[in-house]
Image (cartoon, grey):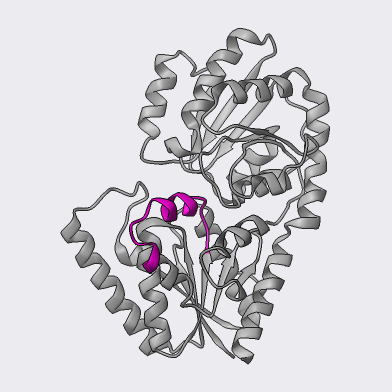
Amino acid sequence: MDKILMVGPSKPYIGGMVSFVDGLCESSLKDRFQLKIFNVNKIKNLDINGIEKKLVVKLLTFIKLIILFVIELIKYRPDLVHIHTSSYLGFLEKGVLVLVSKLFGCKTVLHIHGGGFKNFYNKSKFKKIIEIILNSPSTVVVLSDMWFQWFSRIMNDSKLVVIPNGVSTFENSSLPPNNKMIFLYLGKLVKEKGIFEIIEAAKILEKESETPFKIILAGDGRERNSFEEKVSTNNQCHIIEFAGVVVGDEKERVLNMSDCFLLPSYNEAMPISLLEAMGSGQYVIASNVGSIPEIISGRNNGIIVKPKSVESLVEAMKAVIENESFYRELGKKNKNFINENFSWNKTIYQIENLYKTLLKN
């Protein structure tokens, strides 16, 4: 049985990439390949809020990571190394792991998550280094046709493969309709996800709309205290609830009880939380970034808003609130849309075929 070393963040940490990496290792792939996770977050001893370390500490931590990675390669002797990354310093770090893997004769897959890569590349003074890293692995996986077109301008496109994120849907419990529209955000509580815009939009909507509504902010992050203080200052505690981190059955329950998902992010690649919400039968409001416009078409399954625009978000939320029944029915259709286009089984099938092709060659 061929050995695959999965390099990326894993439990107990949270986030879309964590869900994806752990999901691969718990999938049917484990019946066809010998899988092992090299949990970079655990080795680097990072906490959930990503507290910044001093430069010297970061350097020593990076050296520790490389040493432990080399030891893992020697002990485990993988046939293929699947490295998951986003952008910025994390990408440069994973680029070194790609080069080390090649020195050990391993096939390598660099899987790019996260929506900040355009800004990272365009603002970087190390574009040549980024391009060298991108052209080093056996294959680079991107999440959509849009990302394929963009990356093909800075690297050899024969190495590029599109494998969209996928999610599993679940059977909704038969709950009666809510007596108010419930909006849900699920993810990291950081400014870049548009949390301040959600809070400001709620403040305006409460004044302009006579229809009751509630917003659940589920997750954690380095700026959670700031958001909670803002909500308290605005006297919005009765309409905005901080649910904390939700996983497993609790996550399913929160998805099941909500009507419309909010994701007014500044940057995204192909957000798993958005796909999960649609797979649970929710209508969605999300910003016009990354691969989101490839998922949301017209207003049939969601509404596209401008990032960093409270006005655009208010307009979309108001439309949903004032036409609750109509948008709830549209949301129910999203489950079939996800099953047909972004199923987890389809993602696993594509990754399995990628592994087989690389290992055969």
Residue that appears at 73% across and 21% down: 319
Residue 156 within the magenta-colored segment of the rendering: no
331 and 296: which one is in front? 296
* Residue 48 vertical position relative to residue 153 in the rendered view, above or below: above
Q: Is residue 128 left or right of residue 238?
A: left
For the C terminus, give its image quadrant. bottom right
* Residue 71 vertical position relative to residue 58 in the rendered view, above or below: below
Q: Quadrant of residue 160?
A: bottom right
Q: Is residue 311 visible?
A: yes
Q: Is residue 325 left or right of residue 141?
A: right
For the N terminus, give its image quadrant. bottom right
* Residue 354 vertical position relative to residue 279 in the rendered view, above or below: below
Q: Position of residue 158 (x, y in %)?
A: 61, 76
Q: Which residues are magenta?
A: 112-129
Give the total number of marks visible in the rendering. Answer: 0
Q: Position of residue 229 (x, y in %)?
A: 37, 23
* Residue 50 vertical position relative to residue 309 in the rendered view, above or below: below
Residue that appears at 33% across and 57% down: 125
Q: Position of residue 265 (x, y in %)?
A: 53, 38
Q: Is residue 179 visible?
A: no
Residue 114 within the magenta-colored segment of the rendering: yes
Q: Position of residue 324 (x, y in %)?
A: 77, 23
Residue that appears at 36% across and 31% down: 225
Residue that appears at 18% across and 60% down: 57
Q: Is residue 84 left or right of residue 230?
A: right
Q: Is residue 161 left or right of residue 88?
A: right
